[in-house]
Amino acid sequence: MESTGRARVVLVSRAGCHLCDEGREVVRRVAEATGTAWAEVDVDADPEAVRRWSDRVPVVLVDGVERDFGRLDAGRLTDALAGRRWWRRRR
């Protein structure tokens, strides 16, 4: 996967994905509210990313750890950023 610099949150997405468009807005709002740096990477630009996440985009990583996928939830992302783990990882 490409370098994302100092971003704590990484959104793995693809062009033409309506859930990715919705997820981008969730990530943008939470990142803005919490002052968190974020980056977006194209799943289709990296063969390893395609292998890991192609059928689950969008995927959100916090500090390099997968925290949510599909229909992203602002509450889960906020909790992950705060280190709270009340939620269960969906599969």
Image (tube, rainbow, N blue to C red):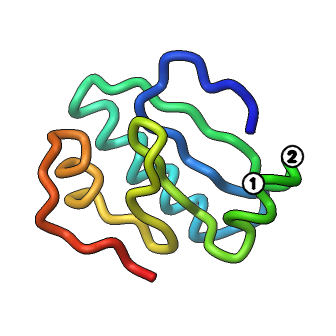
Mark 1: secondary structure: helix
Q: How many marks?
A: 2
* Residue bearing the label numbered 2: 45
Residue at 41% x, 30% y: name it.
8
Q: Is 59 on the left-hand or right-hand side of 73?
A: right
Contact check, label 1 and label 2, Cβ < 8 Å: yes
Q: Is residue 45 left or right of residue 74?
A: right
Q: Residue at x 63, y 66 (%)?
A: 57
Instruction: Classify residue 79 as left or right of residue 64.
Output: left
Q: Quadrant of residue 13?
A: bottom right
Tag of residue 49: 1
- Place of residue 66 in the rendered image (x, y in percent of width and height, measured from the top left): 46, 55
Q: Residue type at mark 2?
A: Ala
Quarter holding the C terminus? bottom left
Q: Secondary structure at mark 2?
A: helix
Q: Quadrant of the N terminus?
A: top right
The quadrant holding residue 37 is top left
